[in-house]
Amino acid sequence: MKDLSGWGRYPRLSGPLDVAFDIGPAAAATANLPGVVARGLGRSYGDAAIGRDNTIDATGLNRMQAFDPETGILATEAGVSLAEIIATFLPRGYFPCSVPGTRFVTVGGMIASDVHGKNQHIDGTFGDHVEWLMLALPDHRVIRCSRDENAELFAATIGGMGLTGTILSAAFRLKQIETGWIRQTTHVARNLSEAVALLRQTGTATYTVAWIDVLARGDSLGRSLILEGEHATTEQLPWGDVRFPSSANGRVGVPIDMPGWMLNARTVRAFNELYYRNGARKTGQTTNVPWDSYFFPLDSIANWNRIYGRRGFVQHQCVIPVAKAESAVSEILDRISSHGAGSFLAVLKRLAPGSGLMSFPMEGLTLALDIPVSEKLMTLLTEIDALVVEAGGRMYLAKDATQSPTTFAAGYPQLDRFRQLRSEIGAKDRMASKLSERLGI
Amino acid sequence: MSDIDQQAPPKSLLVIGGTSDIGRAVASAYAAIGWKITLAARNIEAADRNAADIRTRYEAAHVTVRPLDILETATFAGFLDQLDELPDTVVCVVGMLGDQTRAQNDPKHAAQVIRTNFEGPALLLEMLASRFVERGHGLIVGVSSVAGDRGRASNYVYGAGKAGFTAYLSGLRNRLAGTDVQVVTVKPGFVRTSMTADMDLIGPLTAAPETVAARIAALQMRPANVIYVLRAWRLVMFIIRAIPEAVFKKLKL
Ligand SMILES: Cc1cc2nc3c(=O)[nH]c(=O)nc-3n(C[C@H](O)[C@H](O)[C@H](O)COP(=O)(O)OP(=O)(O)OC[C@H]3O[C@@H](n4cnc5c(N)ncnc54)[C@H](O)[C@@H]3O)c2cc1C
Ligand SMILES: NC(=O)c1ccc[n+]([C@@H]2O[C@H](COP(=O)([O-])OP(=O)(O)OC[C@H]3O[C@@H](n4cnc5c(N)ncnc54)[C@H](OP(=O)(O)O)[C@@H]3O)[C@@H](O)[C@H]2O)c1
């Protein structure tokens, strides 16, 4: 039995883990094991990567297959990590078209969650750049899926949370970049409407994201830093800077669980205050930031999830359609800040529609918050989820550990088609995770 | 560091056991510094998988796969004749842990374990050694095991095979001492690979395949005779060898 808990370490669950070292065994495990899903690096927060009865560790599928420098298309097995892809191809002048906030994720995990980066409103999700994928089905077949072959299953697998089969390998496009530096411009928003306006104004920038001080209240509710980024060109680098800096990340770690009391309203407030003031000093300035601290700031602290203590935490990420976005986000922030012991991290981003059947993104604003687990939490989340449903929004399955089946169903209009497709390929009841059981997928 | 920078033609590496995790890591480390790679393996599909990975990660133009079954000793001469060139360095990682209990009751299984760890590798490296001597230079690296330093109840069939291989390498090194052909014995200790995936290994005594590979690649600059990849193992095995047999035989190891 292995601890299979997600990154939030809530819920705490363990189960048997079947390590697949090659394509053949991964496909066989998919067909032979009941109640199974694949697992990558376990960076989903809740119960998505925990099989109902069995879990396939796909990180042994770690071979790269081919790269075409002309088209930028890279084919790899599904367990290859984003960290390895960047380490290999950044020095050659290529970067993935879409990256999440950590590079310790696998290709399979990025496709199954159809992850979005800070450029999703312009460049789409990771799934938008996938050319084809090889999928192992519960009936022993291994099929190639693309926009032209098995197109419906392709669309269902992108964002399908591993519930249509095990992704064995995939090909996806990398884009060419001149340097490994990002030109970052910081803007300050004194409250939520300024933040929303700034996100709209900076909408033509390649990367934008807002970091919200969750504990600010009243007139300052939603005060935030908006970080805008562009890939720096060679000319924009100061003379003498390395074009492709290697990562300085990953040196410090949180070796043990921090005691829960360390993370109370006061320490979190102090952190947020510091972060906000620090950033505010840089307002309007443009600086060159290395790729790792721009895209993956949290990767510099190994096991940072342990700062939330033994009880773990949840990440609540919703997206709200444009029309109601500002009012709903404002109401959610209001509830959170009055809840007390709050969150280190709150991120606000613009999203455009995703391409998969069950993809999370839709035209609107997405808000992501970390909240430590406590008795009071579930009531708070139920209230917030009701606000999300009312505003026509949905919750991100890669982060989810708590939503109800009705909240879920309200957010995903294609759910019936997805279920039907699962029946057609014999995946219903066979491919199953704790998440799919909880939500009735 | 790259050999290409010095404009000499790239050197070539032959990995015997090209499907093993340690072999893959060794081939990757050499490809990263511009060497030509040949992977010898009985499972061609699995070796092709590693070859594609190495080509993709290191922009390696010369990665070749060649069929070889280490138990088919009669094929060795033909295998060597058909190589594109005689390699500058050969690293032999072929091995088989087998099942100790089964080996006690099934002589066929025991023979396979012993032949895979000892007979096959020793005979093939002997042939390579004479070709290296004829050419005038070469580096031979044999991956053996600390299990060969002293026989233990839990794995002595494997250990005996490795002990034979270790002794063979030692003798070969002795014989070639006056030549430009180097012979190195590598004892990795515990390595986290698919061979040991199900075992509970002791963290501080366990190396990553990449660490073993880095030591083997460093041999190009820093010659050695016998390497314990993690230094702690030298001490551990010194102690284990020093225990008097009368005591040792009663230990549960
Ligand atoms: C610090 C941090 C920041 C993050 N930032 C973002 C962000 O900005 N944007 C974003 O979109 N996400 C973000 N995430 C979420 C993360 O990108 C996703 O959860 C991603 O799926 C994790 O990949 P993984 O390899 O760890 O997959 P796991 O967590 O192991 O699995 C996630 C899902 O993918 C499925 N899966 C994994 N491998 C396969 C396979 N081979 N075949 C089929 N299904 C498979 C699993 O069954 C599961 O449903 C963040 C996570 C962290 C910890
Ligand atoms: N892992 C450890 O902790 C550890 C410790 C000390 C020493 N070692 C030694 O290190 C070496 C590599 O081990 P590993 O951990 O990487 O394990 P491994 O993956 O099992 O490596 C064994 C290799 O030997 C090959 N092989 C076995 N029989 C063969 C045959 N008849 N013909 C051709 N090839 C054959 C295997 O090929 P197939 O893929 O075709 O089976 C495989 O490539 C072995 O010699 C092992 O004894 C390992």
Image (tube, coloured by chain):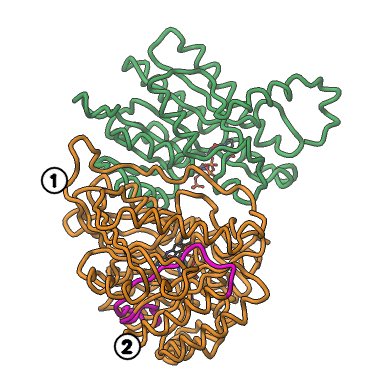
Location of residue A18 (image quadrant): bottom right
The quarter holding residue B35 reads top left
Region in magenta: A339-364
Mark 2–mark 1 Cα distance, whole angstroms, equals: 41 Å
Residue drawn at (28%, 71%) of the image: A199
Asked if one can make out residue A158 in the rendered structure from this viewpoint, the answer is yes
Identify the chain drawn in orange: A
Furthest toward the top, the residue is B178
> Mark 2 — residue?
A323
Examine the structure image and report whether residue A363 is included in the region drawn in magenta. Answer: yes
Q: Nearer the viewer, residue B40 or A197?
A: A197
Question: Residue A430 magenta-drawn?
Answer: no
Q: Earlier in the sequence, mark 2 or mark 1?
A: 1
Secondary structure under tag 1 reads helix
Name the residue at 33% across, 66% down.
A209
Q: Residue at x 60, y 31 (%)?
A: B145
Q: Is residue A15 toward the left or the right of residue A423 in the image? A: right
| Residue appearing at x 59%, y 71% in the figure | A340
Q: Can residue A25 be seen here?
A: no
Q: Viewer-proximal residue, B176 or A83?
A: A83
Q: Is mark 1 within 8 Å of ligand 1?
A: no
Q: Residue B97: x and y, percent?
A: 62, 42
Give, as a three-letter code, the residue at label 2: Ala
* Chain drawn in green: B
Label 1 belongs to which residue?
A235
